[in-house]
Amino acid sequence: MPEAVSRPTLEAVATRAGVSRATVSRVVNGGYGVRQPLAERVRRAVAELGYVPNQAARSLVTKRHDAVAVVIAEPEVRVFTDPFFALQLRGISKELTAHDNQLVLLLTEGRDDHTRVARYLAGGHVDGALVFSLHLDDPLPGLIHDAGVPTVFGGRPGWRDRTGTPMYVDTDNRGGARTAVRHLVGLGRSRIAHITGALDQTSAADRLDGYRDVMAETAGGGLDPSLVVESDFTPAGGERAMRELLGRRPDVDAVFAANDLTALGALRVLRERGLRVPEDVAVVGFDDMLPLAEQSDPPLTTVRQDIERMGRLMARLLLRGPSALHGTSVPHGASAPEVSSAPDRSSGPGGTGPAARTPGPGVILPTTLIRRASA
Amino acid sequence: MPEAVSRPTLEAVATRAGVSRATVSRVVNGGYGVRQPLAERVRRAVAELGYVPNQAARSLVTKRHDAVAVVIAEPEVRVFTDPFFALQLRGISKELTAHDNQLVLLLTEGRDDHTRVARYLAGGHVDGALVFSLHLDDPLPGLIHDAGVPTVFGGRPGWRDRTGTPMYVDTDNRGGARTAVRHLVGLGRSRIAHITGALDQTSAADRLDGYRDVMAETAGGGLDPSLVVESDFTPAGGERAMRELLGRRPDVDAVFAANDLTALGALRVLRERGLRVPEDVAVVGFDDMLPLAEQSDPPLTTVRQDIERMGRLMARLLLRGPSALHGTSVPHGASAPEVSSAPDRSSGPGGTGPAARTPGPGVILPTTLIRRASA
DNA sequence: TTGAAAGCGCTAACAG
DNA sequence: CTGTTAGCGCTTTCAA
């Protein structure tokens, strides 16, 4: 790879401005304690020479890097067929940029990668890490903890160490599930089934819990295990589960699927069996994965989570600590299910937005039910 | 953000092993010219202390960073609802990892970001850049060129500078389009329409060219402008275009859509009009965007491009230069370790995989027609 | 306020 | 082969 041209140094700027390196350094770093005219001269020299500080030299002495690692551990393909990932990154990127931090992306796909990532983090090349670890048995979180780098997790981690639960940001999976199922109840459905996600992920477990919450409190119902089918968040899994479900409960009149992909598979089986949606069976998904959720037949009623905001919040939490949340957090219990039928995707820039809950070291973001045709 | 604990230095390792810093440095950097037993002792000390080189200190003297910037300039949402992006990154990440390089992600969404990125690149923080710039009028490529950083583009850039066309990797859009249209011809269709992508992107222009190539050479046909509708790569655009098309050519019997999203929109309009696919109208897409292409109704016949490989190749090109494409490059000196491309089906060991063309400074990757139900 | 000087941790000549 | 010695470009005491 060709060599980059050598760039002007502090020294060069100092010479040009007729001052010492120390003075230039002060000006470059905010200019406190430097007299106006001098500072002005320095700034001119900087501009003329096109000076940009050498980050390596700076880090060497300050021991800071103004860089954050984003670790995405996903041996499965799912993350890559999912806008989730991209939206998350976008949110993170925005926040980091606002704080003049760089984003170092670490993608892992197996055991070897884990040690590689752990070594990198332990190497002190970054000031902190944002980690997405979806599975309960993932060894990565432990390794990262040992690396001693400040870390915020995306999604509630399924483990805890002696320190307790680590900092994390998550969607209100349980609450969102409740909203979805209550919506179905409100539609007059009583034999409401749930196709779960991969239960080794906290998101799937939490959504199942939400479903159970509502079913347990519902007059006619109570918990009927035959209405719950375990699946894995994929369309194929959704198909399988739907067939299974139809086999044991032909009378089912509503399905809450753990995510949109699953709902899609269910939809297909329903269509193939000649069952009408939502007339015969109402279907609700989770994620509001676009364009899928809009383009399905019929368009999917689903629970939206604000992925980008989640990313932004993770970065903010890492950069500024828990205090970043002050002024926006809401005492728990105060969250009411929000319903919107207007597919309006905007979330206010800046701020942490409405009704983020902060239980202990975690931040929980609210969800919104998006009503389309399927339920 | 909390401070990271201080790590052991070269000095510490040297003391522990009873050698000089220089010797430790040699061992850490490959160990050439160090006697076996000594090297062994050093390695033990390294392990015991958990020593990891300080990259900042190293960069300061070597002027290399072992880091590459990935710039994704996409003011539109499209990239984010598209696995494209993620797959690209995964390919890049794999290759960079194999070369012990870090991936610094730069996402941009507007004018301000451009100058920010340009400054960063000009600042010499990375050894090179991989740039995705989709639009003809994008000012970013020019800025990046001025920054003087070695760069490889993703997708054929729509501009050229005094140096000629910059290095790039692209899918064989034109060839893929030809394959798609020939397939339709082979099916006996003669009134084959094309819904274009956003024509300010080279990919859309190239696909249109491929369509024209085949139509021009087809016996019955010749070019009929009424069969071409301009659109924008979105499902909504696809719907609009399909309606327009049906309005002026009710006799159309096949549609080649510029991408799968567009095809999806077309499919919906066709269904709504009671036209059967593929009996009445055959439809072919482009991208093989999963799970969409598989889950549509009917499943989509489409042109697949190997996105991940594209990313991998971009990184390889940047890291090793054009020689990366001539089979196994011979490392000069005894040092350069042979880079093992991970066991993977799409690209041969060290090579560029099957049938990659290299016209001038560009590399063109082949496509595959995936036959499903829609054509 | 400003400048002089001492390193941050590492690599790269150059000696030995 | 191995050790000694200069810095890389910057921040940061410490004096002036």
Image (spheres, coloured by chain):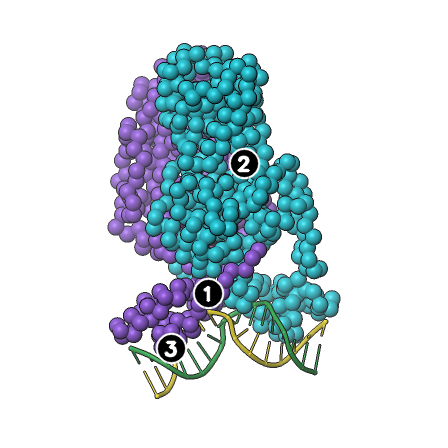
Chain colours: A purple, B cyan, C green, D yellow
Q: Which mark is residue A20?
A: 3
Front position in the image: B375 or B13: B375
Q: Secondary structure at mark 1?
A: loop
Where's residue C14, x and y in %? 64, 78
Inter-mark Cα distance, 1 to 2: 36 Å
Q: Is residue B125 visible?
A: yes
Do circles 1 and 3 both sit on a common chain? Answer: yes
Marks 1,3: beta carbons within 8 A: no
| Residue for badge 2 | B171
Where's residue A248, x and y in %? 49, 17
| Residue for badge 1 | A7
User: Which chain hosts label 1?
Assistant: A
Do circles 2 and 3 both sit on a common chain? Answer: no
Q: Residue at x 49, y 32 (%)?
A: B206
For residue D10, above or below residue B350: below
Q: Residue at x 56, y 45 (%)?
A: B361
Q: Secondary structure at mark 3?
A: loop
Inter-mark Cα distance, 1 to 3: 19 Å
Q: Residue at x 71, y 68 (%)?
A: B34
Where's residue A184, x and y in %? 34, 23
Q: Is residue A296 visible?
A: no
Callout 1, which amino acid? Arg
